[in-house]
Image (spheres, rainbow, N blue to C red):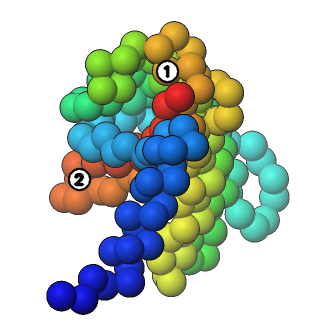
Amino acid sequence: MRIPRRSVLVALILCQSIAYGYPMSQHARGTFDVAIAPVGTPDVGEGSALGTMTLSKTFHGVVDGTSKGTMLTAGSTGTPGSAAYVAVERFQGTVDGRKGGFALVHRGVMSARGQDLVITIVPDSGSGELKGIAGSLGIEVKDGKHFYDLEYTLP
């Protein structure tokens, strides 16, 4: 029987990670509700429309809790769907039963070609039982419902 080379590589990486004490990535998936409220739109003349908004989220599932944050946006005045945003939010609650909090930083760019969204846990922002958490958050919206996929490590 021939073992695929990819399986051998995955097994070697797993063994090394365990032997050297590197934490293995975990995934927490579920849904969240979000409320976005405009704070203001500065008058910047012609070009992109800028805005400031507050974020309020409630997470359900393996991640259970709330977050609050601020978002800055830039939208195209001529092409619907083209926009960019940055945001910072602070989560408080539990991740897989571990209580604490952490901050997330967002960078999103949308256009007719698609979207590029990167959401990362702010290094060293974990508190309580989530101290040392690292990772990233993926978001998907289907039929108006928001889904998250938190890929994380904990020491």
The answer to whether one can see residue 137 in this image is no
Residue in the image at 64% along x and 25% along y: 125
Please tell me whether mark 2 or mark 1 is closer to you in this view.
1
Amino acid type of the residue tagged 2 in the rendering: Gly
Label 2 neighbourhood size at 10 Å, few (<14), some (14-19), many (20+)?
A: few
Is residue 86 at all visible to an observer of this figure? yes
Circle 2: element type? loop
Query: How far apart are the two marked residues, 2 and 1, measured between alpha carbons?
Result: 30 Å
Which numbered disc covers residue 144? 2
Q: Which mark is residue 91?
A: none
> Which residue: 23% across, 53% down?
144
Please tell me in which quadrant of the rendered image residue 21 appears: top right
Left or right, residue 56 beside residue 132: left
Displayed quadrant of residue 42: top right
Choose between 52 and 141: the one closer to the eye. Answer: 141
Question: Counting other residues with Cα less than 10 Å from the Cα at mark 1, is it few (<14), some (14-19), or many (20 or more)?
Answer: many
Q: Residue farthest to the front?
A: 1
**Quarter of the figure with the N terminus:** bottom left
Most extreme residue toward the right is 45
Picture coordinates of residue 12, whole percent (x, y): 45, 64
Residue at 49% in and 31% down: 154
Given residues 114 and 21, the one toward you in this image is 21
The dot on residue 130 is: 1
Element type at marker 1? loop
Please name the amino acid that badge 1 sits on: Leu
Q: Position of residue 98 (x, y in %)?
A: 37, 17
**x then y, percent, for residue 90:** 55, 25
Residue 133's quadrant in the figure?
top right
Q: Nearer the viewer, residue 61 or 80?
A: 61
